[in-house]
Image (cartoon, rainbow, N blue to C red):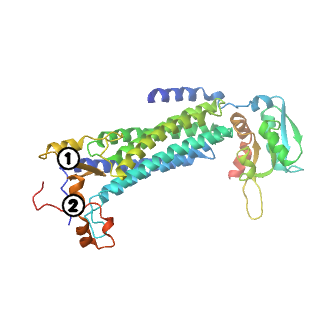
Amino acid sequence: MNRYPPLPPEISDKIAQARRLEWWTLFWLMTIIVVMFLVMGSSQAMQAAWIEDTLSLLPPILFLVAARLERMPPSAKYPFGLHRIGTLAFALSAAALTLMGGYLVYDAAVTLIRQEHPTIGSMELFGTEVWMGWLMVAALVYSIVPPVILGRKKLAIAPDIQDKVLHADADMNAADWKTGVAGILGLIGISMGFWWADAVAAGLIGLDVLKDGGRNLRISVAELLDGAPRKLGSDEMQDLARRVRKGVDGAPMVKLREAGRYLHVVIGDDESLLPNPERAKELVGEEDAWRVVTLSVASGKKPL
Amino acid sequence: MFRQLLAVALLFGLAACELPKDPENTTQTVQGAVLKVGLLQDPLPQIDLTAVTLIADALNAKVEWHRENTHRMLDALEIGDLHLLAGGIPEDSPLTDHAGATNPIGYVTIGADRPERVLLLRRGENQFLMRANMALRPLTREAKQ
């Protein structure tokens, strides 16, 4: 049953490379989550940063699952295969990014409205009293290095393999290091007696993350609704339909939709795809005939 | 931009001797003057008394004791009219939603539980908290053993 065209070797290589990158991302994120957990104490700002680091595990996991399952052969339960798992993974990643932005903004707003002065304690370390804020800064400095490097590498590969999950994950990495920097600035502000510094910095970054999340969600909705293929990381359409039309004689109607990184191309106008009501009744029975809206019949063995 | 931010962070770190500061200047207010302490237990248990005395000594301050309705004392702490609350406060007390807590000075026995014992101070007064923790070190060390 599995008759998907094979992937070109350079594309398989890049997908393999992306998978390795995502495994590394998971590894580094885990170490960051542990380090942050050790120093966060009861600091709300650090708790927010920690929750957000945990949330950023989601896109790499989704990528790895999707990359493993997307070329599964069709089955009785999934007769079209699992191509669209990339679509699903992208929708969930975009949602995670949006959720993270929303959470940051909400948390900052609550802190500012309630005028909560962040209390950060100290501990004895090698005989001197060390303010926990400095330890948190050190943890945050550590937490911004891996996402910067990994995010850049992902952005370099994503267009080649047309991977929106990888692209959204790079956005997530950008959000990670930006909130890290905001956290550092916030802690420095707190140390200078500006209790609002942390919330303001986190809130501004939160708005930025929310914007990225919203953009990804819009693209994702377009893909879920069988919209025309969009450019990676933007809501603009790709000029693929015109290219297909050029390659076919006459001026047929060409429709494209995306399933993850893959394209489904339909050539023929709506009229020719419209099922004959009588034929539909014959095929699926009287009761369900009204549910059939397109009917495509492969026109022989030879590809178009 | 990233590297510059790191450099700025490091510079501030180096100038950190006098940091963190108190947003509401509690340390400055208390130093060489009066440390106003609200009592949650009367008489105050010995360990809390020792803790308060250690902090007062470290800041060269005279202790002024206050005994009122708990809620009023918490309100007073929140606006800086009191500087400390003391008296068998466990670190998981609901009062800590409205106040900062010092490092542990011992333990409180509540039924079968034995949570760490702390003093409460105004939220966000991080210099004051650090000075208090420094003064309380002998008690914290003992508690951690």
In terms of depth relative to the viewer, which is nearer, B28 or B123?
A: B123
Which dot marks residue A296? 2
Question: Which of the 4 image quarters holds residue A285?
Answer: bottom left
In terms of depth relative to the viewer, which is nearer, A243 or A85?
A: A243
Give percent across and percent down for residue A125: 61, 41
The answer to whether one can see residue A112 in this image is yes
Residue type highlighted by circle 2: Ser
Tell me the crowding category of disc 2: few under 14, some 14 to 19, or many 20 or more residues within 10 angstroms, Cα based.
few
Residue type highlighted by circle 1: Glu
**2 and 1 marks in contact (CB < 8 Å):** no
The answer to whether one can see residue A63 in this image is no
In terms of depth relative to the viewer, which is nearer, A13 or A62?
A: A62
Tell me which numbered mark, 2 or 1, is placed earlier along the sequence: 1
How far apart are the alpha carbons under marks 2 and 1?
33 Å
Q: Is the N terminus of chain B in the top left, top right, bottom left or bottom right quadrant?
A: top left
Give percent across and percent down for residue A74: 26, 65
Q: Which residue is mark 1?
A: A10
Nearer to us of marks 2 and 1 is 2
Label 2 resides on the chain identified as A
